[in-house]
Structure formats: structure tokens, C-alpha cells
Image: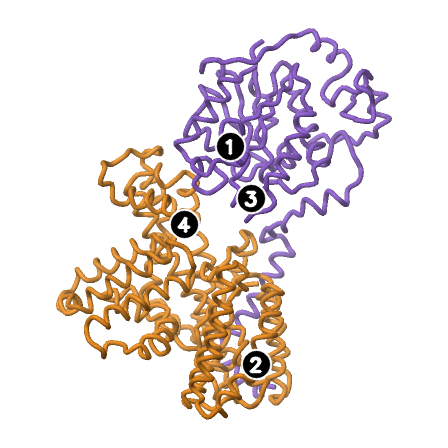
């Protein structure tokens, strides 16, 4: 053991200052003088631990816990594959019964449009949608997108773009169409739970923008080597979620757009030629995505 | 678990308490257990590989020393190690740090075979040399003759602890505050596509990559030598401010010095070095550089990197160096240019990507406009503090100032502040791995 501590401390002041600094750091963290960084959000473990299925979760400002029976009784129903297709309560989670009947009467087609169509469009997404915004903007659409955005935190008051939450953006504007492309960042999230979040988010958007057509874009794939290296976003995970997203759509006011048709290669992965890092399109190839959206627009 | 991680900091703090509290005769066991735990924390396959390599090489060295022709036996044993390393590299089953510690074992075997050292009889001491965790994952490649004295009697002194902490904090800050921020410039441009930005932006990325490679590795070496110093060991210097060099040859005499000297002592000189005529010398230089490229990876970009550097070294050997020695500013520009361009090969994979990158750096077919106008200015505005800090850290002055004033109380307070701010940044942003851990 080192002897003569006084002599030693004099010849190694850094040891003492680091220890004192550590104590101060600890006190500062405990007293909230320094904001403690969050730990890594273990989506998968959280989802597995949480076996309850609620209509809303704690991420929304006015979260409401509602049991399945109460939801059916209140006619705020959600997707339930145990109900038959003809069951009026099997409304796929988006409408009240009256609204469902109203919407059934409307008709939509899918076709090509020009840029004017997107004057009242909103694009919601992560860094890839941000790339679309920067390099191939779709007409004069608005964007709510940023790196790392995911469906789990989408409606949270902590999630802001240019200082505004999504709810605020939806409250301040009237949109005719809303495009969503999210999911790659949470590729290994427990899919059924992830679809619940997605369904709840769309429901929230629906409440704030009742007249908007909602277009759920497929989660864009990554290249095969990227998926091997970063297993959370491998094709199998994204396929599972995309299949679930298809089931969420009713092809009447919520539509599924398979944007992967525009960017994949013969293996079904993102074409390596189109990407610099395996996940994002290169700046000069975002037009493929934009053009696909313009060729598969929902025309009332 | 790398040095620049919260987990390492608190594990090392706990380890140090035990290391300093145990009686001196038990310290070697504590060190060995700490090294094994560190290795296992970086991948259980690494620990399993070491569990085989360490005792096997221990016995091979003893056997070689007692053979009639020890060097033949040592060379066979060394070749066995290198064959296993090649198999690891080709199959992709490469434990973290294997390229470094297998070279360490080869050096030990050959030195024993040459009777430059006697084999280490004490298995625990040999294992501590073979698995010494500060240099296990990314070097430096230490020779046994330079390590033996410390292994037998580590110099645990207050001034060494002070010096070690100073080095560690400098390396820690360099990694977390500078290197880990500069990586974002490269990632952002990769995301857009190197062929979609301007030529000036592509050069900015290339220069930043070369700087970041240095900062990343030098920061590791500083932390490694700091940790070793605290434990009472001296590690060989791996970098001697290579950006001060006036030729490519000199740059690589100052860069990854232990790998360079390994190739020189165990491959280049046994092949004849520069003593067998000009043609043979040229061949030897190119061969060594090809091997150096292959050591980094068995892909076309590393092979091209190694051979291109070999060509520059040959040209300098044939007369250019004499000219460079007479000049003042131009040699430094020449070195920065060559190093930047050759390190661009490090950053790219596949011939297509190399062609794209170099087509942007050298737009012989005409300059294409960037898809993000003003990209160079945008990135300079965003990253200039880290670039400036990185350039300063490539000079000798920060380290000299640090060690001069670090032991004064005001210097210690500042360093302590730097340490805890870096911890907070690391905690908040997470850590990115060291680049050379891939080799």
C-alpha cells in the first residue's frame, strides 16, 4: 500500500483534484445542476415487459388508459384480429362508427400528380425524409423530420422540429395529405407493440387533421451488407413491420405506399448504387423517391 | 469495452483500488486477472483465443531456446502464429486486437530464437507480458526485452501516477471531444454521397479523415501509456508527431513506430534490407509495404494504400529525400498531400467507390456542381473548432505544456475540469469505437 499520503498527494495533485471533481460532479448530478443524460432506451426489453395493450400510452400529453372492453363500449375501437372483418367494432383503430360509415362512402384513386398537389402536404419522417426535403423536395410540402425520429416518440412533447411538436404543427395548419416514413431506427422493436404505437400515432394525427389522407410509406430497406452489419435494420425485421403497416391501412383514407419499389435491387435490398452509407439515399438519387410519390398519389 | 467508455472508467477505478491495496507480491496476479477480464469484456472469442495462444507460445519459446538450432524452431512457431492470423483475417473471424498481440508473440519467439533474450520461465510474468491490457487491443507492439524489467518490478511512484493521469486525460479529451466529433463530418458527407458534394468538400473530408485517424490512434496510445504508467509500466512510443515530417519515409518512421520497427526487424532486415543492391532494395521496400497494407486488411483499398506508399518511399530512397531535406515549406505540403490522398484509400472500399472518391478529388473530366451549394463553407462553419483543435494536437506543444504545468495546482484543477467535462460529454453522446480496433 502507498505510504506517506501527504507526501504523495503533494507530488500528484491531479489525483486529488480528480477525486474532488468527481464528488462535485456526483453532487451536481444528484441536485440536477447538471442534467443527467438518459440511459440507452432498450426498446425491445421495454416492449416485452409491457404486456398491456392500451389505446393510448404515456407518450401523448393527454394519455388515456382504456381497456379493450371500455374501448369497444365507447366505440373508440382499435385493430383486433380476433374480430371478424364484418364486425362493426373491427374498425382498424382509426374512427368512430359514424366516421367510419362516412368515410366508406368516399372514393379515392391512385395516380400521377404534379407538384401543386403537394401544397397542403406534410411529410413526417427521420433522417431519410430530411434528405428528401434537402435534395428532392416534393413541391411545396411541409416537413416534420429529423435524424433519429421514431414512431415511439413521435407524439411526445419532447420531440420537436424547429421548436415545435408535431401536435403543434398539426394544430396550426390544415393538411390535405400526410405522408409518414418511419421505422428503420427501431427496426428490432417488438413488432406488435410497434404497430400499436404506429396505430395510436395515426389516430392522434387523425383527430387533429380529420380531413387529411394519410399515406403510410413502407420502411425503406437498407443494403444487404448494412443489414448484416447492423442487424436491427435487416430486411427481415423491416419486412415484418411493413406487412403490419399494410394491415393498418383501409385503402379509403389510410393508404400504404411501397416506396421500396423505386429503390431496391434484384435482391430486394436497397440498391448499393443509390446509397453512400448503406442506409440513406445519395443526394442525387432522392428524386427516385420523390418521383415514386408523385406517381402514386391519392386522388380524390 | 474501450478506454474511452464510462464502463472502463469505473471498472479501472475499482481495479486500481485493488491493485494498489494488495501486497506487492500479489500484484502480478491481480494484473493478470484484470487483463483477462478486459480481454473478455471485448469479446469472449478473444479471451478463448488468448487462452490457447498464451500457453502454446510460452511452451514454444521454451522449446525453441533449448533446440540445437533455436532460430529455425522459433521461425516455425512464428509462422504458425502468422498462419493463424491470416486465417482469422481471411475468414473474418478476427478477435479484437489479434493483429497486435499475435505480432507481439511473434516478436517474442524470434527474439528468443535469436538468443537476444532468454525465454520467460515464470508463466504468470509471461502471461502478463502477453496479455498486458493497456496495449492489448491496439498496441503498441512491445518487445519483451523492453518490458521485462517492469513486469518483474513495476515502478509504482507518485510522479508516474501523475504523469499517467496527465497522458490519459489528454488522450481521453482528444478522443471524445475531437475525434468523435470529426467523424460526423465524414458520416454526413457519406450519407449525401461523396460524388454529390463539391471537390473542395471532398478534399475537406479527406483531410479530416487523415486528421481523425491520427487523433483516434494517438488518443488511444496516450490513454494506453497513461494507464500503463499509473500501473508502473512504460510503453514504447508509437507516434512521434508524424505531421512534422519532411518526407513520407520520415512520416512512417514517426507513425505507428512499433509496427514499422517490427516489419523492419523481422521481415525487412532478414530479407537483406538495403544491403543487397538497388533492385533488391526496391523490391524489399515494396514487399514490406504490401505486407503492411495486408496487415490492415485483405481488400483492394489496403493493398493499393500499401503499394502506393511503397512507391513514394522508393522514389524518396532513390533521391527525392535528399532534395526534400534541403527545402523547408514544400516538403511539409508534399507530405500532407501524399498522406491525405493515400489515407483516402483507407476510407473507401471497393474499386467503384475508390474511383468515385478519386474522381471527385481529381476532377479530370470537369468539375461537377455540388448538390448542396456552399457545402464546404457549411461544414467548415460547423466543424472548425474541432479541426483547429485537432491540428493543434498534431503538434508537440499541447503535450509539452500539459506535462509542464499539469503538476501545478492550477494545472491540475484545469485538467480535472477537462476530465469531468469529457466524462459528461461521453455519457451524453455515447462512444464510438477506435478505428484501429478493426484491424
Q: Between marks 1 and 4, how big is the CA–CA gap?
A: 21 Å
Callouts 3 and 1 close, C-beta under 8 Å: no
A135 or A55: nearer the eye?
A: A135
Determine the CA span between mark 1 and mark 2: 51 Å
Quadrant where the C terminus of chain A sits is top right
Q: In the rendered structure, the residue with mark 4 lies on which chain?
A: B
Rendered hue of chain A is: purple
Q: Secondary structure at mark 1?
A: loop
| Residue drawn 31% across the image and 70% down it | B254
The alpha-carbon separation of the residues under discs 4 and 3 comes to 17 Å
Q: Which residue position is annotated with label 4? A: B349
Which labelled disc corresponds to residue A227? 3
Query: For this rendering, which residue is in front, B58 or B10?
Result: B58
Q: Which residue is mark 2?
A: B127
Residue position marked by numbered label 1 in the rendering: A264
Left or right side of B191 for A248: right
Q: Label 1: chain?
A: A
* Residues under numbered marks 2 and 4 in contact, where contact means CB atoms less than 8 Å apart: no
Q: Residue at x 79, y 18 (%)?
A: A85
Q: Could you give the CA–CA distance between mark 3 and mark 1, rounded to whole angstroms? A: 14 Å
- Residue B162, visible in the rendered structure: no
Amino acid at each position: 500500500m502507498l505510504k506517506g499520503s501527504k507526501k504523495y498527494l503533494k507530488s500528484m495533485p491531479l489525483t486529488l483534484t480528480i477525486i474532488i471533481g468527481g464528488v462535485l460532479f456526483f453532487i451536481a448530478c444528484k441536485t440536477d445542476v447538471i442534467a443527467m443524460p438518459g440511459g440507452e432506451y432498450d426498446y425491445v426489453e421495454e416492449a416485452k415487459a409491457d404486456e398491456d395493450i392500451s389505446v393510448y400510452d404515456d407518450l401523448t400529453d393527454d394519455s388515456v388508459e382504456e381497456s379493450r372492453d371500455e374501448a369497444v363500449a365507447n366505440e373508440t375501437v382499435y385493430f383486433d384480429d380476433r374480430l371478424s372483418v364484418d364486425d362493426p367494432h373491427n374498425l382498424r383503430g382509426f374512427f368512430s362508427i359514424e366516421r367510419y360509415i362516412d368515410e366508406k362512402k368516399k372514393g379515392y384513386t391512385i395516380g400521377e400528380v404534379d407538384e401543386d398537389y403537394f401544397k397542403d402536404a406534410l411529410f413526417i419522417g427521420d433522417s431519410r425524409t430530411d434528405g428528401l426535403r434537402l435534395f428532392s423536395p416534393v413541391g411545396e410540402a411541409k416537413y416534420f423530420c429529423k435524424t433519429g425520429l421514431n414512431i415511439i416518440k413521435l407524439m411526445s412533447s419532447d420531440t420537436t422540429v424547429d421548436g415545435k411538436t408535431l401536435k403543434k404543427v398539426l394544430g396550426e395548419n390544415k393538411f390535405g395529405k400526410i405522408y409518414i416514413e418511419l421505422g428503420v431506427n427501431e427496426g428490432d422493436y417488438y413488432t406488435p407493440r410497434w404497430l400499436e404505437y404506429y396505430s395510436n400515432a395515426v389516430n392522434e394525427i387523425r383527430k387533429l387533421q380529420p380531413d387529411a389522407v394519410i399515406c403510410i410509406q413502407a420502411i425503406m430497406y437498407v443494403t444487404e451488407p448494412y443489414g448484416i452489419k447492423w442487424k436491427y435494420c435487416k430486411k427481415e425485421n423491416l419486412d415484418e413491420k411493413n406487412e403490419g403497416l399494410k394491415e393498418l391501412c383501409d385503402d379509403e383514407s389510410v393508404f400504404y405506399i411501397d416506396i421500396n419499389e423505386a429503390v431496391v435491387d434484384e435482391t430486394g435490398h436497397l440498391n448499393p448504387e443509390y446509397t453512400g452509407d448503406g442506409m440513406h439515399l445519395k443526394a442525387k438519387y432522392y428524386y427516385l423517391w420523390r418521383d415514386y410519390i408523385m406517381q402514386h398519389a391519392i386522388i380524390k | 469495452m474501450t478506454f474511452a467508455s464510462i464502463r472502463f472508467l469505473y471498472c479501472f477505478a475499482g481495479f486500481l483500488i485493488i491493485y494498489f491495496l494488495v501486497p506487492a507480491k500479489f500484484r502480478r496476479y491481480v494484473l493478470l486477472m484484470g487483463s483477462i477480464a478486459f480481454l473478455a469484456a471485448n469479446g469472449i472469442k478473444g479471451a478463448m483465443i488468448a487462452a490457447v495462444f498464451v500457453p502454446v507460445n510460452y511452451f514454444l519459446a521454451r522449446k525453441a531456446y533449448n533446440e540445437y538450432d533455436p532460430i529455425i524452431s522459433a521461425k516455425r512457431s512464428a509462422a504458425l502464429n502468422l498462419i493463424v492470423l491470416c486465417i482469422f483475417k481471411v475468414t473474418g473471424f478476427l478477435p479484437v486486437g489479434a493483429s497486435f498481440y499475435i505480432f507481439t508473440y511473434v516478436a517474442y519467439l524470434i527474439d528468443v530464437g535469436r538468443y537476444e533474450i532468454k525465454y520467460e520461465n515464470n508463466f504468470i510474468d509471461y502471461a502478463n507480458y502477453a496479455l498486458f491490457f493497456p496495449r492489448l487491443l491496439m498496441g503498441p507492439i512491445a518487445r519483451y526485452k523492453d518490458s521485462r524489467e517492469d513486469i518483474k518490478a513495476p515502478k509504482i511512484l507518485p510522479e508516474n501516477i501523475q504523469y499517467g493521469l496527465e497522458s490519459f486525460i489528454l488522450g481521453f479529451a482528444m478522443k471524445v471531444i475531437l475525434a468523435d466529433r470529426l467523424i460526423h463530418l465524414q458520416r454526413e458527407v457519406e450519407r449525401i454521397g461523396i460524388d454529390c458534394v463539391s471537390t473542395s468538400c471532398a478534399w475537406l473530408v479527406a483531410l479530416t479523415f487523415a486528421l481523425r485517424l491520427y487523433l483516434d490512434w494517438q488518443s488511444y496510445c496516450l490513454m494506453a501509456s497513461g494507464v500503463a504508467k499509473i500501473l508502473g509500466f512504460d510503453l514504447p512510443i508509437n507516434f512521434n508527431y508524424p505531421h512534422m515530417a519532411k518526407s513520407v519515409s520520415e512520416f512512417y518512421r514517426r507513425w505507428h513506430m512499433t509496427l514499422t520497427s517490427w516489419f523492419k526487424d523481422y521481415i525487412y532486415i532478414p530479407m537483406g534490407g538495403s544491403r543487397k543492391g538497388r533492385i533488391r532494395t526496391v523490391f524489399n521496400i515494396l514487399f514490406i509495404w504490401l505486407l503492411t497494407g495486408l496487415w490492415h486488411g485483405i481488400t483492394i483499398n489496403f493493398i493499393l494504400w500499401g503499394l502506393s506508399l511503397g512507391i513514394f518511399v522508393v522514389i524518396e530512397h532513390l533521391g527525392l529525400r535528399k532534395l526534400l531535406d534541403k527545402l523547408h515549406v514544400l516538403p511539409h505540403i508534399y507530405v500532407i498531400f501524399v498522406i491525405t490522398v493515400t489515407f483516402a484509400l483507407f476510407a473507401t472500399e471497393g474499386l467503384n467507390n475508390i474511383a468515385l472518391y478519386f474522381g471527385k478529388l481529381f476532377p479530370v473530366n470537369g468539375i461537377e456542381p455540388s448538390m448542396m451549394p456552399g457545402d464546404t463553407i457549411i461544414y467548415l462553419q460547423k466543424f472548425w473548432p474541432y479541426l483547429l483543435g485537432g491540428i493543434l494536437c498534431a503538434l508537440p506543444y499541447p503535450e509539452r505544456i500539459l506535462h509542464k504545468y499539469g503538476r501545478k495546482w492550477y494545472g491540475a484543477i484545469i485538467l480535472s475540469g477537462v476530465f469531468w467535462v469529457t466524462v459528461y460529454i461521453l455519457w451524453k453522446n455515447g462512444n464510438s469505437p477506435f478505428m484501429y480496433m478493426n484491424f
